[in-house]
Amino acid sequence: MRFFRPAPCCRCHVAAHLLCLVLFIGGSLSASAQISYEARLTGVEDPVVDVLLRSVSKILGENTDPPASFLHLRRRANRDVERFLEVFHSRGYYGAAVALEVDRDATPMQLEFQATPGEQYVFGAIEIRGAEGGESEDVAQLTEALGLATGMPALADPIVAGNNKLLTHLRNHGYPTPVIKKRDVVVHHATQEVNVTYHVETGLFATYGENRYEGLERVRPVVVDKLLPWSTGEVYDQRQVSALRTRLYDTGLFATASVDPVPADITGEGELPIRVLVTERPPRTISTGLEYKSDEGVGAQFRWENRNMKGLGHDFSVETTLATELRELDLRYHVDRFRRLDQSLSSSFVIAQEEREAFDSDRIELLAFVEREVSPKLTLAAGAGLRFGRVEQRGETNNHELLYFPLEARLDHSDDPLDPTRGFKLRLRLEPYLDPIGELTYFTKTDLEFSYYLSFGSFETADKKTLPNWVLASRLRIGAIIGADRDEVPADIRFYAGGGGSIRGYRFQTVSPLIDDDPIGGNGLTEFSVEVRRRLSETLGVVAFIDGGLAFGETYSDFDGDLQFGAGLGVRYYTPLGPLRFDVAVPLNKRSEIDDAFQIYMSIGHAF
């Protein structure tokens, strides 16, 4: 075996390696001895600044990564001083100073950041200049949109936000491609003022040019034309471009939609083409539903819908209901944006057969009504209808032909149409009826319903959604038929109470005037409900409720102890389509040989 003997020059290398090894071991040993210290911050009176300083510090607060040496600690502290000064400057304290005092002899080592914020500087001159240094065309409007003014505290956030405010203002007033070339911020310590200058390149002033539609296959271009919030030649406004995108989605005809200007093709006259790119949704859908109520039996619904009739975006649907006590065929034709963007026209043709405990009814109805969205919260509707009916009650059959003119107002200030947790809803419906063929019977049916929702507490789901723990929901409904006696009003138009959407715990329609325990309906109605909803998780909840009220023979009633009350418990399973409802209710003042011991209700959606 041969051994290698290092030459004299190699001995130096070996010694060097041994020295490195010793230093490495020594460094490792010193690294294991972490520095123990305490740190504090003094001199800061502004609570907002104090919170910001502590949030950026690597020294203050909990120390999850203690330094390995004093030099390491000193570097961290010096970096904190730099961060503190940045925070002070962002809050307008440009004359601030931060001194660091270290007591190495104390155990643990003591660090103190001594801050002297000084006076908060204010804005001096605020200027907006063109890219070449010339004044922009609408400096006064831009300065107002900027939101900065002489004398305001010189905070950094509004200076930075000014970039987006300027660009947004320009894009909303005819300039589709503005650019902020640079921003100058000059601090004058002598006057304690900060001057800010924005250098803006507005780009070309533009008006709307041609509209280029891409992706339209089954939908005709005229549908998009009706949605345009601008006319060719008007001044370009980015808000209108965003509004068109929203309107395209709201039609339900498109899966994707983008609306973008094409600056590269702007004409010499400043006409800017707009590109509308869409992907159409399948226009037809089929849906089914099931429900069960122990007082009404099993029910099933089938619905077929075409949302793009004739390529015009008109909605035609066929819905059938097959239930123990109801068979119904409902054909509807709906036209959005009828004569104006906030208005729609709906028409329906209904054939129905009911076999209720109160009556048997066969009817045909034709109805057309116009609905206008006065505001996002308020909707008004008016229409005209024709009703042919045959009603049998207690062995007596009556035929009627009625003209009616429904009027409706809906005010919705709730936070969610499917699962409201706060706010309120108000619905008022008036239906004047006229019999032009018979004895010219005239009467008006009035129906007012108010619901109020109040939430308490909250919890956060796995995907960071915040949901309320408790919801207190209440409802009041008042109805009246004016202008005719009860016997002159067809039995299937009168008011009835009781059932899953009325007073739970009682069979459908049985909280009404009775003859031989059979409900005959009335000219007046009062209902009220209180429901406490407890959300257990994102998908599961429980409720406790109490309902009360009655329908009465005359238009008005003093109640005289005739009110019926029902109470119960329920379970809710929350889905994207709304909550699935399972309720069990009992009558609190059970009537012998009329009311059952309990009722069960299963359907989609809350009771109200």
Image: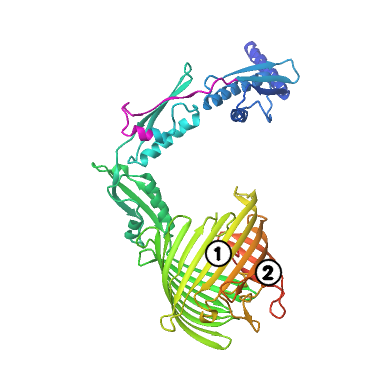
Say which residue label 1 marks.
Answer: 449
Question: Which residue occupies 44% across, 31% down?
Answer: 148
Residue 131 part of the magenta-drawn span? yes
Question: Which residue occupies 59% across, 58% down?
Answer: 452
Viewport quadrant of the N terminus: top right
Lateral position of residue 226 relative to residue 291, left or right: left
Q: Is residue 181 above or below residue 527?
A: above
Say which residue label 2 marks.
Answer: 565
Amino acid carrying label 2: it is Phe
Q: In this view, does 120 lie above or below 599?
A: above
Question: In the current view of this chain or complex, which residue is farthest to the bottom?
Answer: 395
Residue 141 part of the magenta-drawn span? yes
Amino acid carrying label 1: it is Glu
- Residue 11 circle label: none
**First of labels 2, 1 by sequence position:** 1
Q: Is residue 143 above or below residue 459?
A: above
Spatial CA distance of label 2 from label 1 is 18 Å
The quadrant where residue 556 appears: bottom right
Visible residue check, residue 101 = yes
Location of residue 488 in the rendering, given as x and y in whole percent from the top left corner: 51, 81
Visible residue check, residue 2 = no
Find numbered disc 2 in the image and state the secondary structure of the residue it sits on. strand
Location of residue 367 in the rendering, given as x and y in whole percent from the top left corner: 42, 73
Question: In the current view of this chain or complex, which residue is farthest to the right?
Answer: 107
Mark 2, other Cα within 10 Å: few <14 / some 14–19 / many ≥20: many
Viewport quadrant of the C terminus: bottom right
Mark 1, other Cα within 10 Å: few <14 / some 14–19 / many ≥20: some
The residue lying toward the viewer, choosing from 360 and 61, is 360
Location of residue 428 in the rendering, given as x and y in whole percent from the top left corner: 50, 64
Identify the magenta region. Answer: 116-142
Location of residue 455 in the rendering, given as x and y in whole percent from the top left corner: 63, 53
The residue lying toward the viewer, choosing from 554 and 140, is 554
